[in-house]
Image (cartoon, rainbow, N blue to C red):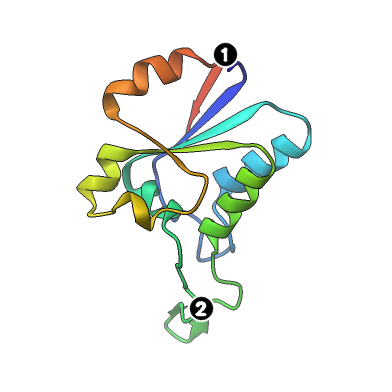
Amino acid sequence: MPGTLQIIESAYRANIEEQDDPAVWFTGAIKGGGADVAVLLGGNAVNYAVRGQDAAGLSFGGRRQTQPPRIAEDLSRLIARGVEVSVVADDAADRGLEPSALIDGVRTVSRGELPRLLAGYDRVWRW
């Protein structure tokens, strides 16, 4: 499993200005360029993999976000393109998320499995 593992732990950054997460977007862009890439969601970013999210009513003061983030859908598209997306199961459980709440195709890994997972990649990038 060579290639690059993108660890995303900081959630919802830049979502006021943009409709996507920069790290998720970047992963799709480099996959489109032929990169061998995978994603590991940890910390608060495990929320990205929850199915059925809807931020359509998002607004800040008088400013409405007309293109709200649809990060779970972005992750589903990555999975459809062959990007392995994993979630740290312990982080999801700490936030009260059941495995059944996650989008299809997401793999769960325990904290104990992380050293072996990380060792399987040539590069590990943390966002």
Residue 97 is situated, as x and y percent measured from the top left of the image, at: 28, 54
Dot 2 or dot 1: first in sequence order is 2
Instruction: Assign a secondary structure to mark 1.
Output: loop
Q: Is residue 116 left or right of residue 95?
A: right
Residue 56 badge: 2
Disc 1 crowd rating (10 Å Cα; few below 14, some 14-19, many 20+) is few
In the foreground, 6 or 59? 6
Name the residue located 58 percent from the left edge and 17 percent from the top edge.
1
Left or right position of 83 against 111:
right
Q: Secondary structure at mark 2?
A: loop
**Residue 25 placed where, x, y %?**
63, 48
Q: Is residue 35 above or below residue 68?
A: above
Residue identified by numbered label 1:
122
- Given residues 121 and 20, the one toward you in this image is 121
Left or right position of 92 against 24: left
To which quarter of the image does residue 69 belong? bottom right
Residue 38: % across, % down: 57, 32
Residue 125 position in % (x across, y down): 51, 27
**Badge 1 amino acid:** Asp
Q: What distance separates the C-alpha of mark 2 from that of mark 1?
A: 39 Å
Q: Amino acid at mark 2?
A: Ala
Q: Residue at x 42, y 83 (%)?
A: 61
